[in-house]
Amino acid sequence: MVFEGSSAAISHTGKIRSNNQDSGYSGDNLFAVADGMGGHAGGDVASSIAIQRLERLDQDYDSTDDAQASLQAVVTTAAADLIRAAKERPELAGLGTTVSAIIMVDDHAVIGHIGDSRIYLYRDDELTQITADHTFVQRLVDSGRITLEEARYHPRRSVLMRVLSDMDNDPELDLFVMPTLPGDRWLLCSDGLTGVVDDPHILKAMRLGLPPGRTADNLLKQALDGGAPDNVTIVLVEVGGAHPLSSGPATIVGSASNPSGMLIPAARAGRASWLHPVRQAANEPSHFEPAADYLEELIEEDRRRAKRRRIGWIAALVVVILALTGAGFLAYSWTQTRYFIGADEDSVVIFQGVQQSIGPISLSTEFEDTDILLADLPPYQRSSVERTINARSLADAMAIVDRLRAGAEAVTGETTMPRPTPTPTPTTPPATPTAPAEGEDAG
């Protein structure tokens, strides 16, 4: 049975790289993305070989088991082709490619995956990443050592743990089957998209409900607006729905669409290297498959980086705490240079500090009880004291108290003396006994 739906495929070099090492395929039943690695020449060849081998799988299958067996066999054959290409053309040594593919069999999707290209499923207004990245940083995420957000910017995010290459004639392919429903949208893409456009923005584009071609254009534009430092390849498949599949040949994009992709590109002029160092760096491999000893070195380096990061966070926290403590001490010291006049239960009091509190902590204390009774004050002065009267200094506070005392005397007709400030009472040291004069009786 031929898969019923609509699809689109698009591939772009990006804004930095000078050649496209990605390849993509969108047919009747097969949909695939391959992201090449191995330098300016090797990546083109690797992704082209993978797609040309996979293209043979675009046919009807009696069962999902048949489709899985065919997919595994073709990927193994592609690995042998890469090994042979590297032997025949030594300049291609180290070439490799990711592969993410779907074969539609009736109402099931047979999925094969190796590398860090991705397959997403958009269903019921939700976006789910179906494949797992075979990368060093994904292992760190899976082990809980870094977060997904940290993985996006990790310096080793391009280190692949599994890839289709000239170093393994028996590639370990993730192979599984999932049911698919009318209205599902399957997105296959290289990391040139996901490295720039995060999942929430991909989901937002899917929710617009545009045809696959326009949705793919939308996603590509977001990647380009974000700088697109790598090649971007997108294959979008809609199961059934309102966008019927138009008849015509399969769509092949990227290196596999150009026969010259199988040739070694000519070397670039040397002058461009110093005029455009960023572009030259962009032509270096976008992925790297490490040897076992190198992986151990990376793990140890990551441990050291994590330790430095923890020490940095602790040091920053200590600095912040010290800064807040110092600022709090200075602020409290300043409050203790302020005074105001207020009332306790029945008398006028000079307070030191300000009239605010920090939670249960009051920023003022009683400095002196003046013994002026609130009942003796004229009504307007009593009201002012009850609302509190701010003073610019202790001397200003004393002057305000003197005026209040005068007001109280005018009401009572009595003179109230200010409360004397207690002074320490001198103590007389005990007399030192003297010895009796010579000839006197000591008794």
Image (cartoon, rainbow, N blue to C red):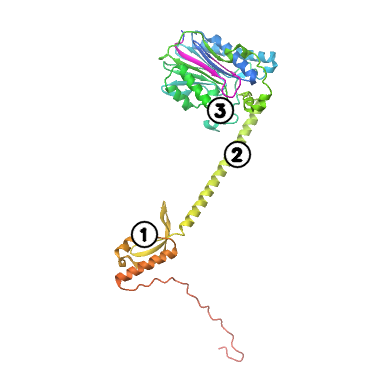
Residue under numbered circle 3? 138
Identify the residue at image location x=41%, y=54%. Answer: 356
Where residue 1 appears, x then y in whole percent? 46, 7
Determine the residue located farthest toward the bottom in the rendered image.
439
| Residue 95 visible in the displayed image | no
The residues tagged by marks 1 and 2 sit, at their Cα atoms, a distance apart of 54 Å
SS at mark 1 in the image: loop
Where residue 269 appears, x then y in whole percent? 68, 21
Q: State which quadrant residue 431 falls in.
A: bottom right
Tell me the magenta residue range.
3-24
- For marks 1 and 2, give the one nearer the viewer: 1
Q: Which sits earlier in the primary sequence, circle 1 or circle 2?
A: 2
**Which mark is drawn over residue 388?**
1
The answer to whether residue 343 is left or right of residue 114 is: left
Q: Is residue 394 above or below residue 231?
A: below
- In the rendered image, the quadrant that contains the C terminus is bottom right
| Residue 297 visible in the displayed image | yes
The answer to whether residue 135 is left or right of residue 216 is: right
SS at mark 2 in the image: helix
Q: Is residue 352 above or below residue 231?
A: below
Crowding around mark 3 (Cα neighbors within 10 Å: few <14, some 14 to 19, many 20+) is many
Crowding around mark 1 (Cα neighbors within 10 Å: few <14, some 14 to 19, many 20+) is some
Residue under numbered circle 2? 308
**Which mark is drawn over residue 289?**
none
Q: Nearer the viewer, residue 160 or 393?
A: 393
Q: Say what amino acid the circle numbered 2 marks.
A: Arg
Q: Which sits earlier in the primary sequence, circle 3 or circle 1?
A: 3
